[in-house]
Amino acid sequence: MSDVSVKICGLTAPDHVRAAVDAGARYLGFNFFPKSPRYVSPEQAASLSGHVPVGVAKVALVVNASDALLDEITATAPVDMLQLHGSESVERVQEVKARYGLPVIKVIGVADAEDLVAIDPYSDVADQLLIDAKAPKNAVLPGGNGLAFDWRLLAGRKYWRKPWMLAGGLNPENVAEAIRMTGARQVDVASGVESAPGVKDAALMRAFIDATR
């Protein structure tokens, strides 16, 4: 289980950013979805980015974002990657990559085996894939709901052509088992390392990353 990369998503405060970096996170996610308790503005993200050392990737999470919003984010905050967490089409992923010249992570929600079929077309265009638990119908948030899917769906699979991350309901208690069952080399966590919605906990972040090792 050694050398699993961790992405901690939805950071909102400088001390949480520093704690995530100190714990060993390799990706830090900034959430630009206004309905999320983890929302930050482009200006806030720019300020938080000042606490991120070289070598740790700064990821902008957006949901069906317009070019205008992406223009504002990329002009204001020094992000390294764009995470498309909505219902963006394969064509939209291609457009975003071409327009901004940044690596794109496409999130695909999974609830059952049928959902896995949707992943392959994105593996042709996205730089990375993020396999998350599908949000319940009528959910306000597309992710960060603390829900897991059946990891057995990924067990023994021949994986996609691109690097991928596992997300959805992960926490310090279950992440080692999730890695064992799926073979994931990268994992993503938001609510599983929080003391309250949007409030990261330094001890939980460290425990989570320790558990991946």
Image (cartoon, rainbow, N blue to C red):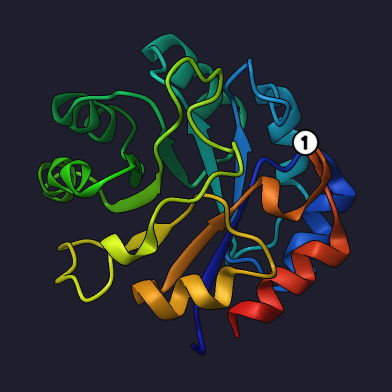
Label 1 packing within 10 angstroms: few (<14), some (14-19), many (20+)? many
Q: Residue 107 in the image: state x and y as whole percent.
A: 36, 41
Q: Is residue 98 above or below residue 177?
A: above
Q: Residue 64 in the image: state x and y as whole percent.
A: 38, 18
Q: Is residue 91 above or below residue 30?
A: above
Question: Would residue 112 appear left or right of 94 to someone viewing this image?
Answer: right
Question: Would residue 193 appear left or right of 25 to someone viewing this image?
Answer: right
Q: Quadrant of the C terminus?
A: bottom right
Q: Secondary structure at mark 1?
A: loop
Going 23% across and 45% down the picture, which residue do you hit? 126
Q: Residue 67 in the image: state x and y as whole percent.
A: 37, 14
66 or 6, nearer to the observer: 6
Quadrant of the image occupied by residue 37: top right
Q: Amino acid at mark 1?
A: Gly
The residue under label 1 is 198
Going 61% across and 26% down the picture, which residue do you hit? 76
49 or 126, nearer to the observer: 126
